[in-house]
Amino acid sequence: MFDILATRQLSDSVFEMTVAAPAVARKAAAGQFFILRVGERGERVPFTFSDWSADEGWIRFIFMRVGATTHKLTHLAAGDQLADVVGPLGVPSHTGGLGRAVVVGGGVGAAVAYPVARAMCAAGDEVTVILGARNAALLILEDEFRALPLKSLVVMTDDGSAGEKGLVTHPLKEMCAEGEVDHAMAIGPAIMMKFCAATTKEFGVPTVVSLNPIMVDGTGMCGACRVTVGGETKFGCVDGPDFDGHLVDFEELMSRQRIYVEDEREADVEYSKGCSCHL
């Protein structure tokens, strides 16, 4: 069992959780993920590290409530326990030697962008972060990003309620056009990553995206997380989650991601019916 140390609600549907997992924290690296189970009969759900401390033995992750399992997580508090935490899994993000790097974090993807940007800074890369969300209420970790030794932080919201109004691709395109980008990384909704990659491809800027395909075992055995990259089948769990954004078949990825959307909604509704917080 793994003790929950702290929880925090970041917006109406986005939450943060810190869990005691010393063995996992000692090995964690930027861009990697882990799999947890809430209870002994619960489903296996992957989450990417948003932070960790090898010295203090904790890991932290940020999630959005989309189904029954994430709904259950929102009702856990410090002192409660998780049945399983397995990791770290996946290949760490590449940092160092990137030169002028731009990290784009959209929505909850900012949780993954934060440790990646931090690792790039520590490795000596010159890092600009473009942080995007639909509105100010959904913007997360802005203070944490501002505490990093970044070249600059650009905040974008669709409605202009925080930072500048517009999409993250707008400042990304401007920077690429001015020759200010040697390497880009995009982390967030698949549609956002798709257009970020299309933007940088126009200027020949190498671009990595962090994919979040459907996943079951996280060890490459089930094949559920398969994605097509450069015409070849790759597994998000063992070959990724980072891939060349210019080679990813985003249409296939998004199609597969939509398979269980309705099931997740129905599971969330069913769980809500029996949840005391709704009585």
Image: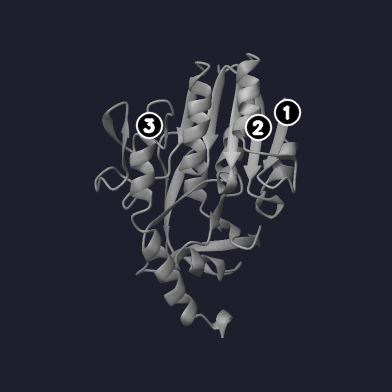
Badge 2 crowding class, 10 Å Cα cut-off, few under 14, some 14 to 19, many 20 or more, is: many
Where does label 3 land, which residue? Answer: 248
Q: Is residue 234 left or right of residue 184?
A: left
State how the image is colored: one colour
Question: What's the mark number on residue 224?
Answer: none
Image quadrant occupied by the N terminus: bottom left
Q: Name the residue carrying label 2.
A: 129
- Circle 2: residue type: Val
Can you say which quadrant of the picture contains the C terminus? bottom right
Identify the amino acid type marked 1.
Ser
Q: Which residue is mark 1?
A: 152
| Relative vertical location of residue 19 with respect to residue 256 in this rendering, above or below | below
Question: Residue 211's x, y, as percent?
Answer: 43, 40
State the residue at coordinates (31%, 44%): 219
Q: Is residue 85 visible?
A: no
The residue lying toward the viewer, choosing from 276 and 255, is 255
